[in-house]
Image (tube, helix red, strand yellow):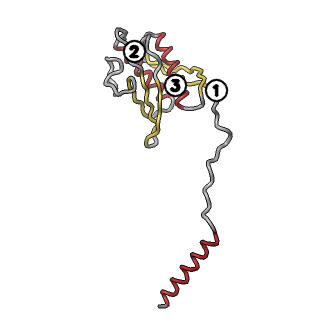
Amino acid sequence: MLVALLLLGSGVAWIAGSLQRGSAPRPPGQLLIGEPSAQVTPADVPVVLVDRDGLRRTLLVEVESLDEFDARLAGAMEQLREALLEESNWPEGVDAPYVQSYEAQRRRVVVIDVPALGPGSGLELLAELAALRSLEETALAHGADEVRVVVEGEPSSTLWGQVALR
């Protein structure tokens, strides 16, 4: 009986104490230092060119974009397309690829969506391989942990009919 009386007394004291304190304290909001930037700013970004012999070189190009990973990488892909066109390692009628990234298990995964190749505008095998390796190496140079290449938004077995995608 004495134990039950002690438990009842401590329970009443605990309930009375919680009523006096009021609601639980809220955690602080997100701490922002400065204002988020929504303006276009110039930045030097790496573009990795892999030639038909497998030799790679890194160029720093200036890209004007929002200060976000996807926007900078998309600007780099446009510059990469121009450089590959000069070396005849990119088809004339194909636009720059679309880039999107996400984080999975603390790894940044970049998905590069390449437009499909039009009929009759094929590339040599080594040129297509150089284009694919340049796309992947440029994304890795920007901090991607994993790169996936799709064609027209769909998984494909090859880039433009000759080089297999992983």
Among all residues in the image, which is located at the extreme bottom? 1
Q: Nearer the viewer, residue 151 or 123?
A: 151
Q: Secondary structure at mark 2?
A: loop
Badge count: 3
What residue is shown with label 1?
Answer: 41
Q: Nearer the viewer, mark 1 or mark 2?
A: 1
Residue 28 drawn at (x, y percent): 63, 54
- Residue 53, numbered circle: 2
Amino acid at circle 2:
Asp
Among all residues in the image, which is located at the extreme right? 34
Work out whether 12 lies above or below 1: above
Residue pictured at 64% horizontal, 29% vertical: 39
User: Mark 2 to mark 3: distance in Å?
Assistant: 26 Å
Residue pictured at 67% horizontal, 38% vertical: 35
Pointer 2 or 3: first along the chain: 2
Q: Hey, which quadrant is residue 89 in on the image?
A: top left
Q: Nearer the viewer, residue 15 or 160?
A: 15
Q: Secondary structure at mark 3?
A: helix
Work out whether 95 lies above or below 153: above
Q: Quadrant of the C terminus?
A: top left
Residue 97 drawn at (x, y percent): 46, 22
- Using a 10 Å C-alpha cutoff, classify the residue at mark 1 as few (fewer than 14 neighbours), some (14 to 19) or many (20 or more): few
Along the horizontal axis of the image, is 103 left or right of 128?
right
Amino acid at circle 1:
Thr
Along the horizontal axis of the image, is 20 left or right of 141?
right
